[in-house]
Image: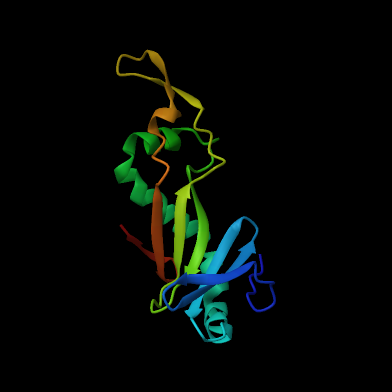
Amino acid sequence: MDINLLTKSMLGHWEAGPGVWQCEYQFGRLLIYVEHRKGELPDERLLDAQRVVQAVWDDLPEALAFAEQRCKTRMPELWRLYDRDTQLCSPLSVFSIHFCLDNPHPSYVVSMNPDFDWDRRVTEADERGEERTISLAQYEPADRFWLNIQRLGFRSFRCDD
């Protein structure tokens, strides 16, 4: 998808905090936010963001894979079951990209994928070879599960947790 903040209509524009305003754009299901200082037009910040936004967008699969790796240590049983069932979509999804003031690294906000089927049951053999059915719902994280993944450069990330 071609991502152009300079030609796309802004979805919203509001004060995000003391001295900070935020521009909001939507591309597909994903939101992109660009912050700028209060009292200044967003044009310069939008130009800065436009220089890298396509590369940031193109790195979405790698950012999601990075987030998944981070979660494997936090939720090992869920990821073990997920890795076994190739028909499942990822339990995680990128919801937005942020270009924040005073931070040279854009970030991805990742949370639980609303399309993931938490009601799904997975069958596996136990240590005796007997099949058992496991509900994925027991591994669903709390509602406030979010990760902030910073893009440091091409396919290079760090997690703020």
Against 124, residue 42 (above or below) is below
91 or 61, nearer to the observer: 91
Whether residue 94 appears in this view of the structure is yes
Against 84, residue 39 (above or below) is below
Against 94, residue 150 (above or below) is below
Q: Quadrant of the N terminus?
A: bottom right
Question: Would residue 30 appear left or right of 144 to someone viewing this image?
Answer: right
The residue at the point 65 percent across, 74 percent down is 4
Residue 154 placement (x, y as % from top left): 45, 71
Residue 11 placement (x, y as % from top left): 65, 66
The residue at the point 37 percent across, 13 percent down is 130
Against 128, residue 150 (above or below) is below
Q: Within the image, what quadrant is residue 135 found in?
A: top left
Residue 54 placement (x, y as % from top left): 57, 72
The residue at the point 44 percent across, 29 percent down is 137
Residue 79 placement (x, y as % from top left): 39, 38
Tally the numbered discs.
0
Question: Would residue 103 appear left or right of 119 to someone viewing this image?
Answer: left
